[in-house]
Amino acid sequence: MGMGRLIVLTGPSGVGKGTLLRSLLKRHPELYLSVSATTRSPRPGEIHGSDYFFVTRPTFERMIANGELLEWAEFAGNLYGTPRTVVEEQIRQGHWVILEIELEGARQIRKTFPEALRIFILPPSIVELECRIRGRGQDTEDAIARRLQRAQEEISAADEFDLQIINDDFDKALNRIEEALFAPAVC
Ligand code: ADP
Ligand code: 5GP
């Protein structure tokens, strides 16, 4: 059995992380994508247990108090966190686990899992980012404004990450993620 590994994918909301990951998982179904808990309401089509575990704020707070989360953060008025047990178990079994999380969570993981590979996905521009969030058509005006404001802060922290990938041409960005994960280590 190979060595388990943790991979963190971060980048502003709307940059295309979810879409890139869906394609990556089609190419590499052996990768394990962690399902986060959140207090955000489901968007149309999102499925409990598959996209997120949608929980109430008291439930989330109980998970924090019980140490059930590997990391957690507040983002645009909602709480998001990574359930600990399943991730630790997958890594123990030798799987490669991907966390798709925002900046504060990625910083926490840097402390607890310094060996994790941390990738930051950048948009070609803020204007294009706004177009993608609007094009997705699933966020309110208030949520869009909060996401764009937060995007600026996140982008300015991109160089804290091991690798920065611009998601302009989708296939090129996907290939770069794939290379980062599967390229043989250089001595
Ligand atoms: P995130 O998970 O980062 O919030 P999504 O995966 O939901 O972002 O993508 C936001 C929108 O941008 C979606 O409508 C998606 O189809 C679109 N998108 C993703 N990558 C690209 C790209 N390279 N070029 C144009 N549109 C893209
Ligand atoms: P969205 O509401 O667009 O699904 O997600 C908003 C932000 O929360 C995104 O940047 C996403 O990466 C982040 N996020 C999703 N799950 C988690 C998590 O478990 N922990 C942290 N810290 N951020 C998360």
Image: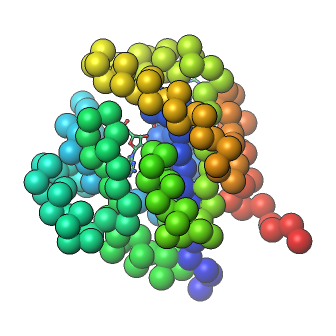
Query: Is 173 left or right of 105, judged from the image as shown?
Result: right
Q: Position of residue 67 (x, y in %)?
A: 27, 71
Residue 124 x %, y %: 65, 23
User: Is residue 69 depicted above or below 51 in this figure?
Assistant: below
In the displayed structure, would residue 110 be above or below residue 127?
below
Residue 23 percent location from the top left of the image:
55, 44
Quadrant showing the N terminus: bottom right
Q: How many marks?
A: 0
Instruction: Please identify the quadrant where the C terminus is shown.
Output: bottom right
Q: Is residue 154 visible?
A: yes
- x, y (%) of residue 68? 27, 69
- In the figure, 11 relative to 132: above or below? below
Q: Is residue 156 left or right of residue 76?
A: right
- Residue 125 location, quadrant: top right
Q: How is the image coloured?
A: rainbow
**Looking at the image, which residue sits at the far bottom?**
1
Q: Residue at x 17, y 57 (%)?
A: 61
Q: Is residue 148 depicted above or below 141 in this figure?
A: below
Q: Which residue ends up furthest to the right in the rendered image?
A: 187
Q: Please tell me which residue is depicted at 27% across the width and 46% down the height of the picture.
A: 79
Q: Quadrant of residue 6?
A: bottom right
Answer left or right for 20 relative to 74: right
Residue at x 32% of width, y 33% of height: 76
Q: Is residue 30 visible?
A: no
- Who's the residue at 30% across and 15% down the image? 141
Q: Using the image as rendered, state which of residue 37 and residue 106 is in the foreground.
A: 106
